[in-house]
Image: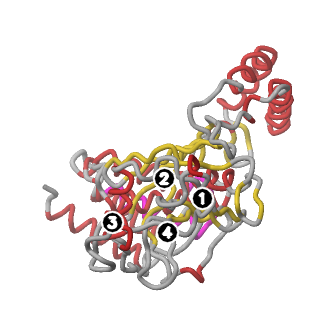
Amino acid sequence: MASDALKQAWDSAQKKIDKGEAESALEILRTDAADDAALKEVTTWRIAGDAKAHLARESGIKKMYRDAVNHYEQALKCNQNDKKSRRALNSLRSEMDGLGIRAGGKAVFWDDGAPTFVGLVAFVVVIGLLLVSLKVIPDYLAEEVEYDAIIEIELYPDAAPKTVASFKEHAAEGRYDGIVFHRIIDGFMIQGGDIENGDIASGWSSAGTGGYSAIYYNQGQQNDMTSWTMPDEFDSSYRHAPGILAMANSGPNTGGSQFYLVDKDSTPSHLDDKHSVFGLAVSGEWMGDEMSGINVIDHISTVPVDESKPTSQIPTIQKVEINGDQATMYINLLDEDGNRDGSNSLPGFSVMASMGTLMLAAVAIRRL
C-alpha cells in the first residue's frame, strides 16, 4: 500500500498537470516519488505518462510522445489490468499514428536531426547484407500466411456494457465465423457482422439486412432470439475516430450483431450519440506484417468494390477470439466461391519485393 507521503505527491503532481504545469508535476515525481517503492506503483508511472503526454502535445516534440508511451507501458508492467493506463496508452498511440509518429524504433537510428551511433552501425550492416537480403527477404515475404488480416481490439465495457456483452457472446458461440464485411467505403468505414445473412458460404446476397442481439434486453419477443435488439449506449468520453468499433443500427435502440470499424483519416462525428461506441482497434497484422489496427482497417478498405459491396476480394471473418476485454479478429480475403485469395503470392512478387528492398536501402543511405 502506498504511503501517505507518496499519495500526497501523486495528488500534488496531478493538480499541476490539471493546471497545465506538466514540468512542475514531473519535478514533484522526481523529488518525492523516485524511491524503489514509488517506482513499483502504477500510479507513479501513469501520472508521469500524463505529464509527458501534455508536454508532447504542447511542444510537438516526438521524443516527448515516445517518453509518454514508455511511461504508460511501465505503468502496465506494474499492473497490466490498470484501465486508466491502458486507455491513455491506446489513445496516445492512435494520436501518434494520426500524426505519423512511431511509438519506438525510429529514434534509435535517427534522433533530433542526426544519426545515432546505432544508426551509423546500421548503415554499415545494411550495405553488407543488401545482396543477401535481396534473396532472403522476398522469399520470406512470399510465404503464405495463415490469415490475411488480424485486428486486435480493446473493448469498452465501461462505455457500453450491454453491447460488449452481446458481442462477446456472439464471438464465443462462433456466430461471426464465416461472416463477411459486406459494406466497405474507403476513407469512411468497413461494416460486417450480419450473422443471419452475411455467411459467404450462403452467398451473402442479403448481407446487411439481418442480425440480432445475443442477449435479451427486454426488446423484441423473448421467445424469438432473432427479434432481439439492444438499447443504445452513449458515453461522451468515447467518440467516433479512426479505429473505433461501433454498433450498426437502423434507428434508435435497434442494434443487433452488425458493427463497423472507422477507417484511417475518418472522424465521423455525425455518428456520435447515434451508434454505440464499444471498442478500438489497437494493433494487428496485414499479410503477416505487424502494424496499427487503424492501418489494417485502411488496407481492408481498399479491396475492389461495386457500390460499397466487395467483389473479387471479400474480407471474411474466420473467427473472433475473446480474452477478457480484448478481442482478436482473424480475417481472410476470399472470392465469391469462398476460396482463399492468392494475391500475396503472385508470380513476380519476389522481383517487386527486391525492388522495394533496394528503394528502402536507398532511403536509409540518403538519411544517413
- Taking the image as drawn, is residue 30 in sight? no
Q: Earlier in the sequence, mark 1 or mark 3?
A: 1
State the separation of the CA atoms marked 3 and 2: 23 Å
Q: Earlier in the sequence, mark 2 or mark 4?
A: 2
Q: Is residue 288 above or below residue 12?
A: above
**Would you name the residue on which mark 1 appears?**
96
Give the foreground label among 3 and 2. Answer: 3
Which quarter of the figure is the C terminus placed in?
top right
| Residue 130: quarter of image | top right
Could you tell me which secondary element the residue under label 3 belongs to? Answer: loop
Which percent across, then down, holds residue 108? Answer: 62, 38
Q: Amino acid at mark 4?
A: Ala
**Would you name the residue on which mark 2 appears?**
69
Q: Earlier in the sequence, mark 3 or mark 2?
A: 2
Q: Amino acid at mark 1?
A: Met
Give the foreground label among 1 and 4. Answer: 4
- Numbered badge on residue 147: none
Could you tell me which secondary element the residue under label 4 belongs to? Answer: strand
**Would you name the residue on which mark 3 appears?**
157
Main secondary structure found in the magenta portion: helix
In front of the other: 3 or 305: 305
Query: Which residue: 41% across, 62% down?
Result: 87
**Would you name the residue on which mark 4 appears?**
246
Which percent across, then down, holds residue 305? Answer: 75, 58
State the separation of the CA atoms marked 1 and 3: 24 Å
In front of the other: 339 or 90: 339
Could you tell me which secondary element the residue under label 1 belongs to? Answer: helix
State the separation of the CA atoms marked 2 and 4: 26 Å
Q: Is residue 49 magenta?
A: yes
Q: Are marks 1 and 2 in contact (CB under 8 Å)?
A: yes
